[in-house]
Amino acid sequence: MNNIDAITNLYTRKERSLQGEQARFDRERENKHILLSFAKSIQERDIVTYDHSRRVATYAQRLARYVGWSRRDARDLALAALVHDLGKTWIANDILHKADTLSDGERKTMERHPLIGARILIGCDVHPFYVETVLYHHEAWDGRGYPSGLKGEEIPLNARILTVADVYDVLTSQRPYKAALSKDAARGRLLSGSGASFDPMIAHAFLNLLDSQPQFTLPQRICAIPSIAKTAYHVASSVRL
Ligand SMILES: [Fe+2]
């Protein structure tokens, strides 16, 4: 191979690598565009879920950074978190906004939302990272979650991080069927769920993060507020996640 051939080869390889970089960049931009469009559709459909998702995205991003993820990976997890409840946009209002405890049938319908969300994302050909985060965000460390009953490290790490962020926000938010827990009470619930609902390493990382930042909990903007009596009743019952 003479010098000219060697230089030509070098440039061809460089050009291919740049094309590969460009393709990856285009794909990422397209994914981001799709996911933000879905986030917007959640905002229009259900503002409470949208606000919840924004807070969860922030918590998940902070937690991912805390356990050593790169800025870019943590940002991708935040994007997934923004649409983690996308499947709820297909759940009927009388179930989605029900202030009373769900019946078994209604609960089963509600529990389809990770699967529905994942199917929507698969249909748009987004990166599997986002699909699996949405699909597995209600799996539990002890295998008692849904939709697949995955256990321990079978659950992708991205979903395990999201689960803790998601539950913390549910616990500290007021919902039509429950009052908000204080930071300390929510802390206690995460601790007791460590090793059962949550990956113990991730749950403890979150608790350390929580303890290190007094202003960690984000304010809740709005929520459909039930009557005081209903709130008092539901605060004593189990939390629907
Ligand atoms: Fe969810």
Image: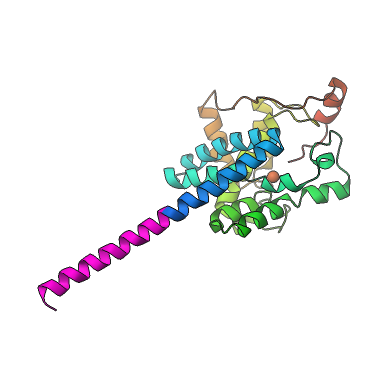
Residue nearest the observer in this picture, 177 or 153: 177
View quadrant of ligand 1: top right
Residue depicted at x 71% and y 57%: 149
- Indicate the position of residue 172 as horizontal and vertical percent values: 68, 29
Residue nearest the observer in this picture, 61 or 201: 61
> Dividing the image into 4 quarters, which one contains the N terminus?
bottom left
Q: Is residue 155 visible?
A: no
Residue depicted at x 44% and y 44%: 68
Q: Residue furthest bottom?
A: 1
Magenta extent: 1-25
Residue nearest the observer in this picture, 188 or 114: 114
Q: Is residue 181 visible?
A: yes
Examine the rendered structure and indicate whether residue 142 appears above or below residue 192.
below
* Quadrant in the rendering for residue 222: top right
Residue depicted at x 27% and y 67%: 13
- Indicate the position of residue 241 as horizontal and vertical percent values: 73, 41
